[in-house]
């Protein structure tokens, strides 16, 4: 393997790297990426590393123990994939066209709000597949080279590398922002030992705006560029596997999978363009479904209807937990009460706990 690595490095010296880079940009557009940037993967000690370690020490990562396990590999690509010299970052728009207005759904407490990135096919599969095709095209031109593709997988600081490559800047909500596309896009990466020419970062354009901080339902953005995941609705509805803390349940409202409030409030998202990717088109009417309808899905319906969806990753039990919270926050109706009562003795202790909390919110439990 080491002989192959040395052979490839020698071959790289003969390449017209500017031409290779230009072709990579062309191919990335053909594969559906809206923008691409290339950054140096130097692993010098920096404020990024110290900031990550401090964030972990405080415990802002909650139960995401994998973040501690991988530690500084997030900051040092060459510790994850030895020999990495460059990070090729890409972005792909995800906002599906012809969806019901997000704010209208959030304000309609009988509806279930699902983060707009999760309305279609699982983006992990889409982006990884396209990145692999991009790597294949590079190999066709230059021969075998060393690389690995990522999309929200493994210990990769996606926003940091995208920012370093000039795709945008880190917003105060901690997401990447672009003047051309807001923040409603996915990121993906190729780690490689190809010594490609790098792009320059751009300046931060958040200015004095704090709309994302002000609007957060649980005040999870505790200061600009710092998020307490333990309070974040995306964490609570997706990453957290156990019981949702009771004080936070009323603040979640009807957000049953993720939360887009900080993005919806961001002025830069007036530039967010709808995606042309059919894979990200709305499935099963999830942009405008009622809480009761989704809560009534059996495990089989959940698995079947959400096959290929990122939502299926959380499983039926967690799905019901989230929906029970949404139903508890909805205005009382006989339909909602009956739906909750039907799962009062659910096999899952987690579901039972949240169902009973929801019924208490409606003053129903004493009558069971």
Image (tube, grey):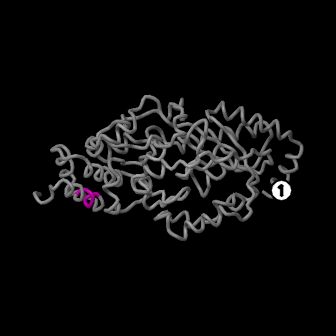
Find the magenta span and give its range: 351-355
Percent from the top left, x then y, of residue 5? 81, 54
Residue at the farthest bottom position: 57
Secondary structure under the numbered disc 1 in the rendered image? helix
Toward which corner of the image does residue 135 lie, by quadrant?
top right
Asked if residue 302 lies left or right of residue 21, the reply is left
Residue lying at 36% horizontally and 48% vertically, measured from the top left: 256
Percent from the top left, x then y, of residue 71? 61, 66
Q: Name the foreground residue: 131 vs 331.
A: 331
Q: Main secondary structure of the magenta part?
A: helix
Asked if residue 188 lies left or right of residue 296, the reply is right
Label 1: which residue? 3
> Can residue 133 be found in the magenta stretch?
no
Toward which corner of the image does residue 345 lie, by quadrant?
bottom left
Q: Residues within 10 Å of mark 1 (few under 14, many from 20)?
A: few
Residue lying at 17% horizontally and 47% vertically, measured from the top left: 338
Q: Quadrant of the N terminus?
A: bottom right
Q: How many marks?
A: 1
Q: Quadrant of the C terminus?
A: bottom left
Toward which corner of the image does residue 23 lie, by quadrant?
top right
> Can residue 353 be found in the magenta stretch?
yes
Percent from the top left, x then y, of residue 309? 44, 42
* As drawn, 225 above or below 283: below
């Amino acid at each position: 393997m080491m002989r192959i690595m040395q052979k490839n490095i020698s071959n790289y010296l003969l390449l017209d790297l500017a031409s290779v880079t230009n072709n990579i940009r062309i191919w990335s557009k053909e594969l559906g990426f809206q923008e691409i940037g290339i950054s140096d993967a130097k692993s010098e000690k920096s404020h990024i590393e110290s900031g990550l370690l401090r964030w972990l020490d405080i415990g802002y990562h909650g139960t995401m123990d994998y973040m501690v396990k991988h530690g500084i590999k997030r900051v040092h690509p060459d510790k994850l994939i030895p020999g990495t010299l460059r990070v090729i970052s890409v972005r792909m728009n995800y906002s599906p066209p012809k969806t019901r207005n997000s704010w209208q759904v959030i304000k309609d407490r009988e509806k279930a709000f699902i983060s707009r990135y999760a309305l279609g096919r699982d983006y992990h599969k889409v982006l990884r597949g396209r990145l692999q095709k991009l790597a294949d095209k590079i190999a066709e031109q230059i021969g075998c080279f060393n690389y690995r593709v990522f999309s929200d997988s493994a210990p990769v600081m996606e926003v940091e590398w995208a920012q370093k490559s000039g795709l945008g800047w880190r917003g105060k909500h901690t997401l990447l922002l672009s003047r051309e596309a807001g923040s409603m896009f996915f990121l993906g990466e190729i780690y490689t030992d190809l010594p490609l020419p790098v792009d320059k970062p751009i300046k931060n354009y958040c200015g004095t705006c704090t709309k994302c901080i002000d609007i957060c339902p649980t005040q999870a953005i505790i200061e600009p560029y710092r998020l307490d995941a333990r309070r974040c609705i995306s964490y609570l509805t997706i990453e957290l596997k156990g019981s949702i803390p009771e004080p936070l349940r009323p603040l979640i409202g009807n957000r049953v999978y993720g939360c887009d409030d900080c993005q919806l409030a961001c002025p830069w998202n007036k530039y967010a363009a709808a995606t042309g990717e059919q894979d990200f088109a709305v499935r099963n009417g999830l942009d405008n479904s009622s809480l009761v309808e989704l809560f009534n899905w059996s495990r089989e319906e959940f698995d079947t209807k959400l096959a290929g969806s990122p939502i299926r990753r959380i499983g039926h039990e967690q799905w019901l937990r989230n929906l029970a919270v949404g139903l508890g926050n909805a205005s009382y109706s006989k339909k909602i009460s009956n739906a909750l009562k039907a799962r009062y003795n659910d096999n899952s202790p987690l579901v039972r706990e949240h169902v009973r909390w929801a019924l208490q919110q409606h003053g129903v439990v004493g009558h069971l």
